[in-house]
Image (cartoon, rainbow, N blue to C red):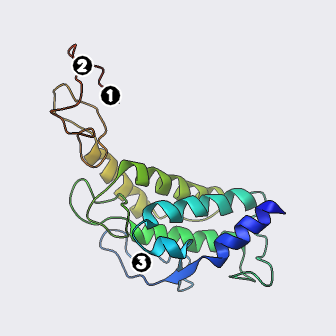
Amino acid sequence: ETVQKGVKYILSQSGNDSYSNQTYIGNPDVNGNGRVIYTCLSGATSESGYSNPIALLGVVAAYSANPNATIPAGWSYAGATFKTYAQDAGEQIMWAQGEGSEPYGRGGWYYSANSSSGDGSIESWNFAALEAVESIGGSVPDAVKSEVEYRLAGGQHSTSDDYFGVYGYTSDCPIGGCGTFPNSSGNGNATTA
């Protein structure tokens, strides 16, 4: 009952978002039903990169054993299945994927949708949410995954120096920049891939 109340609340905070075709992934409305959903209306502001995937993960976890269950009468999106809701919310995440600032923003996510920057922490929640959508039978197009790979490759430091292999937070350097991170030549402990 407590979980149901939580999911009902998340759905009550959800709303349809406007969307458009994206340069690299095309139309994010994979199921063709004409909507993509913010899972948190408060997430329609500057923190959507965190709030939308985290709320979606909660809904998917609650209904992963029965994603084809119908959303009850009296709830937002009543009559749809939880799988359809999750797909539509995943499509909003796909639409929000960054398209610019190569190589650090393209294919990643940031605080707000379609940013030209990427943020490793925010991206991890969006990666997890899209995997959750797939885990219940939803669809994430290969183009979205290719863009994720583009961001991951762009975020890994590839120069043969003390930071080789380090995955950067918002670039290919660690927080503080390549010149301030402890290195692997005796002046600290660099973390490498």
Alpha carbon distance from label 3 to label 2 = 44 Å
Q: Can see residue 5?
A: yes
Alpha carbon distance from label 1 to label 3 = 36 Å
Q: Residues within 10 Å of mark 2 (few under 14, many from 20)?
A: some
**Disc 1 residue type?**
Thr
Q: Is residue 72 above or below residue 117?
A: below
- Which residue ends up furthest to the right in the rendered image? 1
User: Are the residues tagged 1 and 2 within 8 Å (C-beta)?
Assistant: yes
| Residue 10 position in % (x across, y down) | 65, 70
Quick one: 147 or 118, which is closer to the camera?
118
Q: Which residue is mark 1?
A: 192
Q: Is residue 34 left or right of residue 106?
A: right
**Is disc 3 placed on a helix, strand or loop?**
loop
Q: Residues within 10 Å of mark 3 (few under 14, many from 20)?
A: some
Q: Quadrant of residue 184?
A: top left
In the drawing, what numbered circle is on residue 27? 3
Question: Which callout, 3 or 2, points to the residue nearer the camera?
Answer: 2
Question: Which quadrant: the N terminus?
Answer: bottom right
Question: Which callout, 1 or 3, points to the residue nearer the camera?
Answer: 1
Q: Is residue 145 above or below residue 95?
A: above
Residue at image position (32%, 28%) is 192
In the drawing, what numbered circle is on residue 111? none
Alpha carbon distance from label 1 to label 2 = 9 Å
